[in-house]
């Protein structure tokens, strides 16, 4: 009997930590949406540029994008934490002012790194936005949360935010619960330093939902059979966004259990 009681207690605690938000109204506007990952980009149109976002708007796709905070407090749209891959410059976004950043062209094109303000002006509410918040440390993360809210409060269009870091979602949960928030997840490897092992375990098991209480989960579509993913879908009926899906798989039966999609052209 004691064993049964202990088992039930453990299961109850596990489900309490796993439980996402049970709100459905905030996320319903984004169900069924196909979000172009970093805009609609290809070898002619670089990712996360005004050109790639313009293509997505013209084709009627939602837009997934990444935002960082520069040294002088400007929000820019860029995927990586540094400029090495896209601009062949080994410098961090957070160490540069926007005046310094805008001189670098992306992948040797004539496209510079846009500000978030420029993207909002371009999109102007025509398609939904899925905004991933990125920061190299918690202090920058909370600063960008506050900064992005100031811009979005004056934006007339639909948007939701997401992040791999549940602390940023925790900030939105307590400071701006009206904004739809989603937890980005994948099957994180355990190759990091030992001091991060517990955090990585809790994150990939989605037990940090207790902090974020996300309205939706955005999960790597290749790992949909992980236990925590299946439990969130089956028990809590949590809306699931799949990422990053090759466009030829969007109509695949294998993805029918997902509600929305973040995709790329192949």
Image: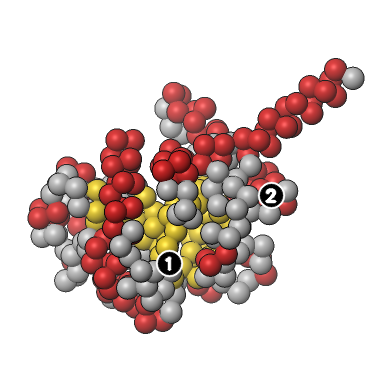
Q: Is residue 111 visible?
A: yes
Q: Quadrant of residue 63?
A: bottom left
Outermost residue toward the bottom in this view: 58
Q: Is residue 23 above or below residue 156?
A: above
Percent of width and height locating residue 258: 62, 62
Q: Is residue 75 above or below residue 188?
A: below
Query: What residue is shown at x 24% (from left), y 56% (from top)?
Result: 76
Outermost residue toward the top in this view: 2
For the C terminus, the image quarter is bottom left
- Which residue lies under the disc numbered 1? 158
Q: Nearer the viewer, mark 1 or mark 2?
A: 1
Query: What residue is shown at x 44% (from left), y 75% (from top)?
Result: 61
Percent of width and height locating residue 69: 24, 48
For the N terminus, the image quarter is top right
Please say which color scheme the image uses: secondary structure
Is the residue marked by circle 1 packed among few (<14), some (14-19), or many (20+) residues within 10 Å?
A: some
Which comes before the other along the chain, label 1 or label 2?
1
As drawn, is 224 to the left or to the right of 111? right
Query: What residue is shown at x 14% (from left), y 54% (from top)?
Result: 98
Q: What's the distance in space between the residues labelled 1 and 2, CA to CA? A: 25 Å
- Which residue lies under the disc numbered 2? 236
Query: What residue is shown at x 39% (from left), y 54% (from top)?
Result: 132
**Dot 1: what SS?**
loop
Percent of width and height locating residue 152: 33, 59
Percent of width and height locating residue 178: 47, 53
**Dot 2: what SS?**
loop
Is there CB contact under 8 Å for labels 1 and 2?
Answer: no
Is the residue marked by circle 2 packed among few (<14), some (14-19), or many (20+) residues within 10 Å?
A: some
């Amino acid at each position: 009997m004691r064993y049964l009681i202990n088992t039930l207690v453990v299961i109850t605690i596990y489900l309490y930590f796993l439980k996402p938000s049970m709100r459905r109204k905030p996320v319903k506007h984004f169900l069924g949406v196909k979000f172009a990952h970093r805009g609609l980009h290809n070898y002619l149109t670089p990712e996360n540029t005004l050109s790639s976002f313009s293509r997505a708007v013209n084709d009627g796709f939602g837009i997934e994008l990444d935002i960082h905070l520069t040294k002088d407090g400007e929000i820019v749209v860029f995927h990586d934490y540094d400029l090495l891959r896209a601009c062949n410059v080994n410098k961090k976004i957070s160490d540069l002012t926007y005046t310094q950043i805008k001189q670098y062209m992306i992948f040797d094109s004539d496209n510079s790194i846009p500000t978030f303000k420029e993207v909002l002006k371009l999109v102007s509410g025509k398609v939904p936005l899925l905004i991933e918040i990125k920061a190299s440390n918690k202090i920058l993360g909370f600063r960008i949360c506050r900064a992005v809210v100031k811009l979005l409060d004056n934006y007339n269009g639909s948007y939701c935010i997401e992040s791999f870091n549940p602390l940023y979602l925790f900030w939105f949960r307590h400071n701006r619960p009206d904004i739809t928030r989603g937890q980005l997840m994948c099957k994180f490897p355990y190759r990091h330093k030992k001091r991060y092992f517990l955090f990585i375990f809790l994150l990939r098991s989605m037990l940090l939902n207790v902090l974020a209480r996300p309205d939706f989960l955005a999960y790597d579509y290749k790992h949909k059979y992980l236990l925590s993913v299946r439990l969130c879908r089956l028990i809590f009926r949590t809306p699931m966004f799949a990422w990053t899906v090759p466009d030829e798989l969007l109509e695949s039966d294998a993805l029918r259990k997902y509600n929305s999609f973040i995709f790329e052209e192949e």
